[in-house]
């Protein structure tokens, strides 16, 4: 039973100095400090449950997202949780259609990141209280702007088929599912959702660090590796050759340019890296350039290289157009860039209709903890396939979460605790709160000296 009135919303600016070790560095973001706007919802319910939500940032600018969260807070505080759950679609629209704040969006940028943080907290609180059925899930989705591609009736049909597969599914060979499993749920419980690692090959890492981390990953059973590229071609060739030689020809290699190139430059650059047999090139150009992605995608077909994008797609409309334009072969949702579970559900369903595999973006602060839920839901209730599907994993900052993502045999194992896995350890939040947390007081004082 959904219960409680939201009595308080608080938000904190939490930052981790990952730039000191080069963690997270790529061709466009050379010194990221992995950070989050961390939202906490409290209710007047006797159970004392709280909802925790985050949105991911890279340091500077987190304070802007915090301001946006506070600007949206009046839409949330004093709302009855049952009222929200009973008409989640309307609540979603209320947040995304504020008559004044919408002007600095709409449904994109800082205001949408803030929306995601709030909605992630609502989902965490709601998920701790009760389960969901297909009709309830559909009532959370705003189909505005996407009905030319996916109607509510089509979405319901997809979810209905998924309900059947929870107990029995086949043929297994075509879906890359373990043959001994009799259902999608059993597959996840026994083997988890396949993951790939980005932790070995950040652009700011030396060759020695890359080599050491790659060796450790191989020993831990990883078979899928992503390399950051795009700053210097000869450097990319050297690093790709190094990691390909280490992992061998059978393991999977992906490339990520983080939006570094123009369209023509992307095709030419990736062609020079084709000898290393990458599965995809991720974010080869501006995330807003749908037709540019389509051009790159078409040009790389003869090389057998796909295009992956999505971590910085503003909303479901951009994903709709990428799918319509055949601009990507791998779709990458982000649990904090889009409007939380609500909007990600619509993208998962559209991807299913177009039969494009979803390989979510993760890493950062809490992204792995969040997106594991979406990946496992996608397999059990929507796609029922693991062919060409995997979820990103980055081995940073999980120790700061109360319910960290669990990896076994290079796969995400299903979370066992109720909620959205978004709650951080209070001691970690206190130490890393910006600018008055213990960690930042020391760092800022050192910078002044």
Image: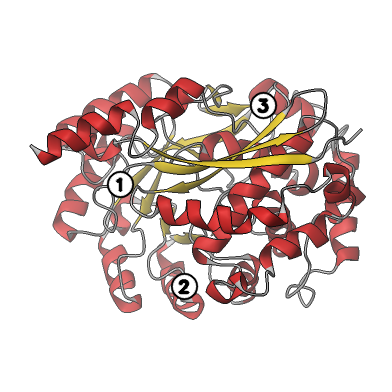
CB atoms at circles 1 and 2 under 8 Å apart? no
Asked whether the viewer can see residue 358, the reply is no
Q: Badge 3, how many Cα within 10 Å: few under 14, some, many 20+?
A: many
Q: Badge 1, how many Cα within 10 Å: few under 14, some, many 20+?
A: many
Count of picture labels: 3
- Disc 3 marks which residue? 414
Q: Is residue 45 above or below residue 384?
A: above
Alpha-carbon distance for marks 1 and 2?
Answer: 26 Å
- Disc 1 marks which residue? 32
Q: Quadrant of residue 373?
A: top right
Provide residue 341's location: percent of width, then percent of height.
69, 49
In the rendered view, does 143 fall on the left or right side of 26? right
Residue at 44% from the left image edge and 52% from the top image edge: 279
Alpha-carbon distance for marks 3 and 2?
Answer: 33 Å
Q: Nearer the viewer, mark 1 or mark 2?
A: 1
Sequence-wise first label, 1 or 2: 1
């Amino acid at each position: 039973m959904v219960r409680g009135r939201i009595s308080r919303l608080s938000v904190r600016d939490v930052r981790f100095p990952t730039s000191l070790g080069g963690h997270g560095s790529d061709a466009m973001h050379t010194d990221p400090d992995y950070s989050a706007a961390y939202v906490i919802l409290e209710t007047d319910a006797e159970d004392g449950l709280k909802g925790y939500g985050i949105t991911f940032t890279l340091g500077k600018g987190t304070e802007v997202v915090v301001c946006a969260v506070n600007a949206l807070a009046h839409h949330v505080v004093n709302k009855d949780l049952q009222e929200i759950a009973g008409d989640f679609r309307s609540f979603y629209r209320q947040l995304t259609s504020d008559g004044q704040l919408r002007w600095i969006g709409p449904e994109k940028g800082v205001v949408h990141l803030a929306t995601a943080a709030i909605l992630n907290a609502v989902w965490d609180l709601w998920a701790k209280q009760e389960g969901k059925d297909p009709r309830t899930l559909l009532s959370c989705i705003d189909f505005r702007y996407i009905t030319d591609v996916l109607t509510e009736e089509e979405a319901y049909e997809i979810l209905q088929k998924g309900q059947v597969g929870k107990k029995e599914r086949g043929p297994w060979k075509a879906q890359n599912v373990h043959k001994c499993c009799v259902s999608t749920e059993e597959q996840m419980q026994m083997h988890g959702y396949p993951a790939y690692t980005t932790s070995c090959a950040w652009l700011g890492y030396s060759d020695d660090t890359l080599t050491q981390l790659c060796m450790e990953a191989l020993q831990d059973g990883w078979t899928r590796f992503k390399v950051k590229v795009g700053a210097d071609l000869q450097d990319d060739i050297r690093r790709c050759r190094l990691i390909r030689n280490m992992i061998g020809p059978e393991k999977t290699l992906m490339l990520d340019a983080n939006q570094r190139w123009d369209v023509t430059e992307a095709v030419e650059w990736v062609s020079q890296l084709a000898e290393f047999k990458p599965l995809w090139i991720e974010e080869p150009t501006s995330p807003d350039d749908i037709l540019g992605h389509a051009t790159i995608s078409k040009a790389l077909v003869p090389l057998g290289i796909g295009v992956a994008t999505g971590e910085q797609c503003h909303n479901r409309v951009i994903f709709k157009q990428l799918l319509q334009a055949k601009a990507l072969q791998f779709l990458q949702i982000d649990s904090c860039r889009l409007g939380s579970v609500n909007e990600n559900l619509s993208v998962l369903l559209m991807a299913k209709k177009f039969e494009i595999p979803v390989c979510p973006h993760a890493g950062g602060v809490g992204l792995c903890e969040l997106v594991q839920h979406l990946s496992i839901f996608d397999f059990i209730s929507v796609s029922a396939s693991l062919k060409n599907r995997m979820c990103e994993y980055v081995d940073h900052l999980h120790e700061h979460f109360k319910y960290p993502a669990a990896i076994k045999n290079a796969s995400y194992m299903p979370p066992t605790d109720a909620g959205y896995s978004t709650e951080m350890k209070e001691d970690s939040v206190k130490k890393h709160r910006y600018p008055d947390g213990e960690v930042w007081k020391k760092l800022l004082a050192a910078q002044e000296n």
